[in-house]
Amino acid sequence: MNAIQNPKEYRLENILGALALTLADRITAEAETVTGIGGIGASILIAIRSDPGILIEHLAGQQNKSQSTIVRAVQQLEQRNLVSKSAGTDRRTMKLMLTDAGMSCADSILNARESLLTKTLKRLTGTQRSELEQIVEKMLVNLIDHPKDAFPMCRLCREECCGDDLDCPVERGAAAKER
């Protein structure tokens, strides 16, 4: 094991890691509490909210999961009356839509996430928030290795907060990787 010569030099990385894990754990816990379903249920609801009528096979690609995994998760959401299916352009494809209860659940997931993040940022001044926003945008772009990285990064985002794709740092970063 490589020992760090001066651990204090890595304090920022250490506390950023603690923040990232804490936020991820708490967002996941809130989403599971709201949906009553663990795993990928919350991100499926948000994906359908963002792209009503998405096909199961497209959702599987976005989620980086097998089609059978997505089918099982969608069945659970359907049993809870959160998702409905309808035939796609051919008999082999299924389009997914949120029911009213599903839309309410997806909105609750996003509201819980935003509440946690607002609490996390509440002691920052307007200037600090603006500076942090610029820093986080750069950090997100640095994490994009491939255009397919965009969806997993934003799987629980409220898309309308970033506006169109050109306003979203993740979408801009993913587009740059396509070139």
Image: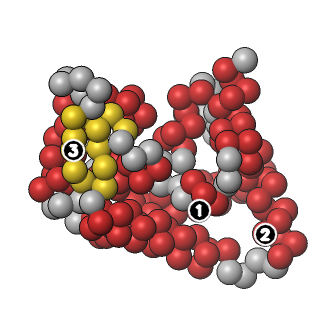
**Viewer can see residue 153:** yes
Residue lying at 54% horizontally and 70% vertically, measured from the top left: 114
Whole-angstrom CA distance, mark 1 to mark 3, is 38 Å
Residue 166, numbered label: none
How many C-alpha atoms fall within 10 Å of the one at disc 3: few (<14), some, or many (≥20)? Answer: some
Q: Which residue is mark 1?
A: 19
Does the CB distance between marks 1 and 3 fall below 8 Å?
Answer: no
- Percent x, y for residue 157? 53, 55
Residue occupying image coordinates x 74% and y 42%:
166
Q: Which residue appears at 24% of the width and 53% of the height? A: 83
User: Which corner quadrant of the image does residue 144 belong to?
Assistant: top right
In the current view of this chain or complex, which residue is farthest to the top? 179
Which sits in the foreground, 98 or 172? Answer: 98
Above-or-below relation of 111 to 131: below
Image coordinates for residue 27, horizontal then vertical, percent: 44, 64
Q: Which residue type does callout 2 highlight?
A: Arg
Residue 28 or 87: which is nearer the viewer? 87
Which residue is tagged 2? 129
**Which SS class for mark 2?**
helix
Task: Give the spatial CA distance, label 1 vs label 2.
Answer: 16 Å
Q: Residue furthest bottom?
A: 123
Q: Quadrant of the N terminus?
A: top right
Q: Secondary structure at mark 3?
A: strand
Question: Which is more N-terminal, label 3 or label 2?
Answer: 3
Residue ID for mark 3:
85
Q: Is residue 66 visible?
A: no
Dot 1: element = helix
Left or right: 22 in relation to 17: left
Answer left or right for 54 relative to 80.
Answer: right
Q: Position of residue 121 (x, y in %)?
A: 67, 74
Q: Earlier in the sequence, mark 1 or mark 3?
A: 1
